Image (spheres, rainbow, N blue to C red):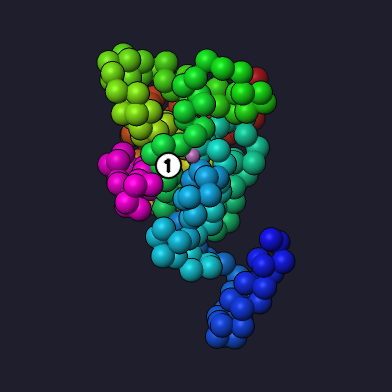
C-alpha cells in the first residue's frame, strides 16, 4: 500500500546521519550517467551498491537512447555538458520484456513505436540472430546487441562528439545484468574517442551549428 512506502521513507530518513542530507543539498557531482531498463528487477543504485549522489539515472523500457527522443537526449546533454560525467553506462538486462515484445509479431499498441528501433537492430543482425535456434538464447543475444546499439548511438551524438572536441574525456560502456544471479557482465564495447565513431556520423571540430548555406 502507498502509505507503507511513506512510512518506510520516514524510517529511512530518520536512520541517516543529518550530515548526509546536508552534503546532498550542496549539489550533485555524479561520476556516472546510468542508462537502464524501467524493469522493477533492475534498480540502478542497489545493484552497484551506490548511494544518493553517485549516479545520474535515466531509465526507460529496454534502455534506449534514440535520436528523436527529447527526454533521453536532454538527460544525456545535461549529464555531459553540465555534470561533466566521465562515464556513461548503458546497463541492459537479460530477459528484457521490451526486447521480447520487439521480437514478436503481435500488436502491443503504442509501445510498438517505442520498440521499433529494436526491430531495426534485430534486422541489422538477423544473420547472426536467425542462426540461434534456442529462443531464449536468441532473446538474450538481442538484449546484448541492443546495449551495443545504444553505446554506438550515444557515441555518435553531437553531445558526446562536441564533448570530446572540448577535451572532456567521456567513455561509454556497455554492460548487461543477469537476473538469474545479480551479476553484471561487461560487454567490452567501450567507446572513448571519435576514431571509434563510423565516419558518416562524425562532426568536424571546425563546423559551426549554422553551417554553410
Ligand atoms: Co527490460
Q: Nearer the viewer, residue 190 or 95?
A: 95
x and y percentages locating residue 169 in the rendered image: 40, 51
Quarter where residue 73 is shown? top right
Q: Residue furthest front?
A: 1
Q: Is residue 169 visible?
A: yes
Q: Is residue 1 left or right of residue 142?
A: right
Label 1 CB-ligand 1 distance < 8 A? yes
x and y percentages locating residue 176 in the rendered image: 36, 43
x and y percentages locating residue 182 in the rendered image: 35, 53
Q: Nearer the viewer, residue 69 or 143?
A: 143
Does the magenta run of residues contain 178? yes
Q: Residue at x 49, y 45 (%)?
A: 36
Does the magenta run of residues contain 107? no
Q: Residue furthest right?
A: 3
Mark 1, other Cα within 10 Å: few <14 / some 14–19 / many ≥20: many
Which element carries disc 1, helix, strand or loop?
Answer: strand
Of the 4 image quadrants, the one containing the N terminus is: bottom right
Q: Residue at x 39, y 17 (%)?
A: 124
Q: Is residue 24 above or below residue 40?
A: below
Q: Residue furthest bottom?
A: 18
Q: Is residue 73 above or below residue 18?
A: above
x and y percentages locating residue 11 in the rendered image: 61, 78
Q: Give the residues in magenta.
A: 171-190
Q: Residue at x 41, y 42 (%)?
A: 93
Q: Is residue 76 visible?
A: no
Q: Residue at x 30, y 41 (%)?
A: 187
Q: Is residue 89 above or below residue 137?
A: below
Of the 4 image quadrants, the one containing the C terminus is: top right
Return the residue at label 1. Answer: 92
Quarter where residue 13 is shown? bottom right
Q: Is residue 207 left or right of residue 93?
A: right
Amino acid at each position: 500500500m502507498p502509505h507503507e512506502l511513506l512510512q518506510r521513507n520516514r524510517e529511512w530518513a530518520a536512520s541517516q546521519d543529518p550530515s548526509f542530507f546536508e552534503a546532498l543539498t550542496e549539489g550533485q557531482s555524479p561520476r556516472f550517467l546510468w542508462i537502464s531498463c524501467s524493469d522493477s528487477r533492475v534498480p540502478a543504485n542497489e545493484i552497484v551498491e551506490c548511494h544518493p549522489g553517485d549516479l545520474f539515472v535515466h531509465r526507460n523500457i529496454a534502455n534506449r537512447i534514440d535520436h528523436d527522443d527529447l527526454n533521453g537526449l536532454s538527460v544525456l546533454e545535461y549529464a555531459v555538458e553540465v555534470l561533466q560525467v566521465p562515464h556513461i553506462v548503458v546497463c541492459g538486462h537479460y530477459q528484457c520484456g521490451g526486447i521480447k515484445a520487439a521480437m514478436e509479431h503481435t500488436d502491443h499498441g503504442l509501445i510498438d513505436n517505442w520498440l521499433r528501433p529494436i526491430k531495426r537492430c534485430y534486422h541489422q543482425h538477423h544473420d547472426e540472430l536467425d542462426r540461434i535456434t534456442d529462443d531464449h538464447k536468441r532473446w538474450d543475444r538481442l538484449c546484448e546487441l541492443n546495449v551495443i546499439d545504444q553505446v554506438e548511438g550515444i557515441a555518435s551524438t553531437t553531445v558526446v562528439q562536441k564533448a570530446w572536441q572540448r577535451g572532456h574525456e567521456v567513455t561509454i560502456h556497455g554492460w548487461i545484468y543477469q537476473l538469474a544471479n545479480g551479476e553484471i557482465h561487461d560487454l567490452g564495447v567501450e567507446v572513448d574517442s571519435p576514431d571509434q565513431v563510423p565516419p558518416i556520423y562524425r562532426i568536424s571540430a571546425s563546423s559551426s551549428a549554422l553551417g554553410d548555406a
